[in-house]
Image (tube, rainbow, N blue to C red):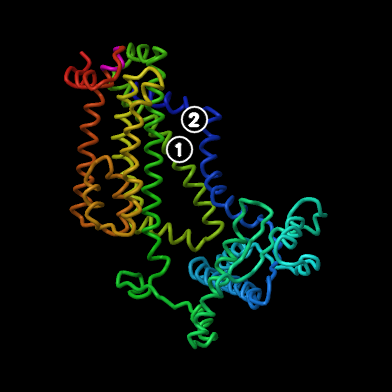
């Protein structure tokens, strides 16, 4: 046991003492935050497009007003959604959460577009080439920046239907084009209703209507309306499955690279002179498990500190679900079984590989298999009792991830006991198989193949 602990400590220290490990450890939450913040920053930093709208001839009368109406309605809809989001956030995170949600949505703003008055020469020019030549000049770089425009919209009618020619400064920017298309579609709809004798006020009221829909469930905490507290276990379960997948794959990959590197450098031969292959395998698996636990504790600590600071009420609910709901027990149990399965498998593969190229040929098929739980976990959140989810949950390689995601839905006890027993039984089988393969691979220069792997299992490396 002493040699196993020494090997585990050596394996842990080999990574934990490096600057790169801690940088990559902290980089994940940082880039996670940036991944959510950058799109918002990009949207909020978009310039406001200066747009001129010109009606070309009496047949286009009323289309400018329709465009202005469409912009006003868009702003009103966005403001209404902002208020709804703030009200929902207040229910979940108090007034501080509502204020933060409202500020965030306000900073994102709505459509970054402003309709400005048309220059006198553009307005007075004759429709056709003369007007479009002036439009080109305002969209170019020859005029002072204050006089330049981002888009010129020339409204007209074709066969009695609204139409437009949209000139833009940037050929790749279709924001104004999309907005004008929607605005003219709405104008045509209102005109059609008007022609049919339907009151325009009724049309506008219908377009503004937003039904009040309340989600109810007998399984909610109140026995009626569904609250954020009722949805939180599902969110935590899905997050647990993804985090578990990331931790297990990260740890198993570290173990694969460690064994492969030590075999190519002949360090494994030195270790085998003072410890058995089983002790080396156990020590390495334990050392990387300690490393993975460190990663989980750091990520968990950063996440908990951020949540407690930003939304203490939500943090209290998360703690309640994890502790009283038993989610932490599910996570630990499936983490242990899942890590054991994948760690010994990757260690055995690493013992047969001497170069990254050898390992890459095997990592591809394995990662393709591991994509399956990532896809099914989202279905497990919505329909945890779907047949495909239930069947895949019994496959040991998928069990840790899918059962973590299904845990909040309280699956039948026989499924919990059965899948967990199957997972640990398969994990023990993998330990036995991987132990024999690791011993054979560490002591030989044979390349990994089905024949060599099967021979190692049969012979145990003798």
Question: Nearest the camera: 164 or 291?
Answer: 164
**Image quarter (top left, top right, bottom left or bottom right) of the N terminus:** top left
Above or below 324: residue 282: above
**Extreme residue toward the right, this view:** 144
Within the image, what quadrant is residue 288 found in?
Answer: top left
Name the residue beneath numbered marker 1: 294
**Image quarter (top left, top right, bottom left or bottom right) of the C terminus:** top left
Above or below 260: residue 430: below
Callout 2: SS: helix
Name the residue beneath numbered marker 2: 16
Q: Position of residue 347 (x, y in %)?
A: 33, 26
Q: Position of residue 92 (x, y in %)?
A: 48, 67
- Judged by its main secondary structure, the magenta piece is helix
Question: Nearest the camera: 41 or 94?
Answer: 41
Q: Are marks 1 and 2 in contact (CB under 8 Å)?
A: yes
- Tell whether position 351 is magenta: no
Task: Write down the region rendered in magenta.
Answer: 440-444
- Give the Cα distance between marks 1 and 2: 9 Å
Answer left or right for 130 relative to 257.
Answer: right
């Amino acid at each position: 046991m002493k040699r196993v602990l020494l090997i585990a400590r050596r394996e842990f220290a080999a990574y934990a003492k490096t600057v790169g490990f801690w940088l990559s450890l902290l980089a994940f939450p940082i880039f996670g935050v940036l991944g959510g913040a950058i799109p918002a920053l990009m949207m909020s930093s978009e310039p406001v497009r200066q747009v001129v709208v010109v009606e070309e001839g009496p047949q286009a009368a009323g289309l400018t007003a329709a465009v202005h109406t469409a912009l006003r309605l868009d702003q009103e809809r966005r403001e209404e959604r902002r208020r709804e989001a703030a009200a929902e956030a207040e229910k979940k995170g108090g007034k501080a959460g509502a204020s933060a949600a409202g500020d965030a949505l306000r900073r994102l703003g709505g459509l970054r577009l402003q309709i400005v008055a048309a220059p006198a020469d553009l307005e007075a020019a004759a429709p056709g080439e003369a007007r479009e030549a002036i439009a080109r000049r305002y969209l170019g770089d020859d005029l002072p920046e204050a006089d330049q425009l981002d888009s010129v919209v020339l409204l007209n009618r074709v066969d009695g239907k609204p139409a437009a020619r949209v000139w833009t400064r940037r050929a790749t920017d279709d924001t104004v084009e999309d907005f004008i298309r929607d605005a003219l579609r709405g104008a045509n709809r209102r005109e059609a209703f008007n022609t049919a004798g339907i009151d325009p006020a009724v049309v506008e009221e219908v377009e503004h209507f937003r039904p009040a829909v309340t989600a109810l469930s007998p399984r909610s905490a109140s026995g009626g309306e569904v609250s954020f507290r009722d949805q939180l276990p599902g969110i935590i379960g899905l997050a647990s499955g993804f985090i578990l997948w990331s931790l297990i794959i990260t740890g198993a990959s570290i173990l694969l690279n460690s064994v492969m590197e030590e075999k190519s450098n002949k360090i494994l031969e030195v270790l085998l002179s003072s410890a058995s292959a089983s002790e080396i395998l156990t020590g390495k698996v334990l050392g990387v498990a300690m490393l993975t636990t460190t990663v989980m504790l750091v990520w968990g600590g950063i996440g908990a500190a951020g949540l407690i600071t930003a939304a203490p009420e939500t943090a209290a609910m998360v703690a309640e679900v994890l502790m009283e709901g038993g989610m932490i027990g599910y996570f630990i149990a499936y983490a242990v079984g899942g890590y054991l399965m994948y760690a010994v498998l990757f260690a055995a593969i690493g013992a047969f590989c001497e170069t990254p190229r050898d390992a890459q040929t095997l990592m591809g098929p394995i990662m393709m298999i591991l994509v399956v739980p990532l896809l099914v976990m989202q279905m497990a959140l919505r329909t945890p009792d779907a047949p495909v989810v239930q069947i895949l949950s019994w496959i040991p390689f998928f069990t840790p991830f899918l059962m973590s995601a299904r845990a909040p839905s309280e699956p039948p006890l026989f499924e919990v006991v059965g899948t967990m027993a199957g997972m640990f039984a398969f994990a023990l089988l993998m330990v036995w198989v991987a132990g024999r393969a690791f011993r054979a691979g560490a002591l030989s220069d044979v390349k990994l193949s089905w024949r060599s792997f099967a021979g190692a299992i049969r012979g145990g490396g003798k």
